[in-house]
Image (spheres, rainbow, N blue to C red):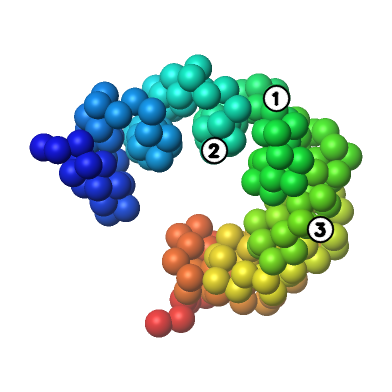
Amino acid sequence: MAAEDSLQKGLAAQKAGQPQQAADLLGQFLKEKPDSVPARLALAKSLADLNKKNEALAILDEGLAKTPDNVPLLLAKGGALAGLERREQAIEVFSQVLKLDPKNVEALKERGESLNYLGRFPEALADLNQAAKLAPQDPWVFNKRGMVYFCQGDYQKAVADFSQAIRVGPDVPHSYFFRANIYLHHLHQKDQAMADYRKGCRLGHPLSCRELEKLGGKADK
């Protein structure tokens, strides 16, 4: 099989939800074309999907050994470290990205999330506030900032951010799920929670469907 065929078929397998086939094909391509950043990123993703997170990290590190300032590879490495719960190291990598590109929204979002996991709330909010200024139409900026407020027990601000996420990205089911959990467990507004779980379920979010069923509701057909 020609190298380019391996790449295209590997990417197609990844898109079709066949991570093992994708990993085999992309690994074959990368042996012939080791400098291909798109293939390296795709292979790392397929390995992560197979729960081979350490192997995914090694693939990214191989690329970074040659191009240490490659922003896409650094972002992927930060995500891989976060997935391994190596949050301090993830923060260091996202900080490296921000030194190279101070307005990189993905790095701000992801560093903010890792800072939140470590309970460093003021730093997390600083990153996510900056991300909100740079990308006010990105629902995940507000979802991640909403989680910071939630972790601090500021449920009203959390609801406000999840509501903003819904306004700018009404097709993102997670926003409804996050807001519903606060309505149900902290603000004791069952009807609003059920409405949000129903919307999340309609958008294909299985946890929303499960919570709606537990409350005695039914998903829209």
Would you identify the image quadrant in which residue 38 lies? top left
State the residue position of label 3. Answer: 133
Q: Position of residue 96 (x, y in %)?
A: 70, 28
10 Å neighbourhood of mark 3: few (<14), some, or many (≥20)?
A: few
3D distance between C-alphas at marks 3 and 1: 23 Å
Q: Element type at marker 2? A: helix
Check disc 1 and give the amino acid type.
Glu
**Residue labelled with disc 2:** 72
The mark that comes first in sequence, 1 or 2, is 2
Q: Quadrant of residue 165?
A: bottom right
Which residue was labeled with disc 1? 92
Task: State the image quarter where residue 126 is shown.
Answer: top right
Q: Secondary structure at mark 3?
A: helix
Q: Residue furthest left?
A: 1
Image quadrant in which the N terminus is located: top left
| Lower position in the chain sequence, tag 3 or tag 2 | 2
Alpha-carbon distance for marks 3 and 2?
22 Å
Closer to the camera, 34 or 137? 34
Q: Amino acid at mark 3?
A: Lys
For the view shown, which residue lies furthest in the bottom direction?
A: 221
Q: Residue 190, image x and y in percent?
A: 69, 71
| Res 158 visible | no
Disc 1 secondary structure class: helix
Picture residue at 22% right of the left edge, 29% below the top:
28
Q: Nearer the viewer, mark 1 or mark 2?
A: 2
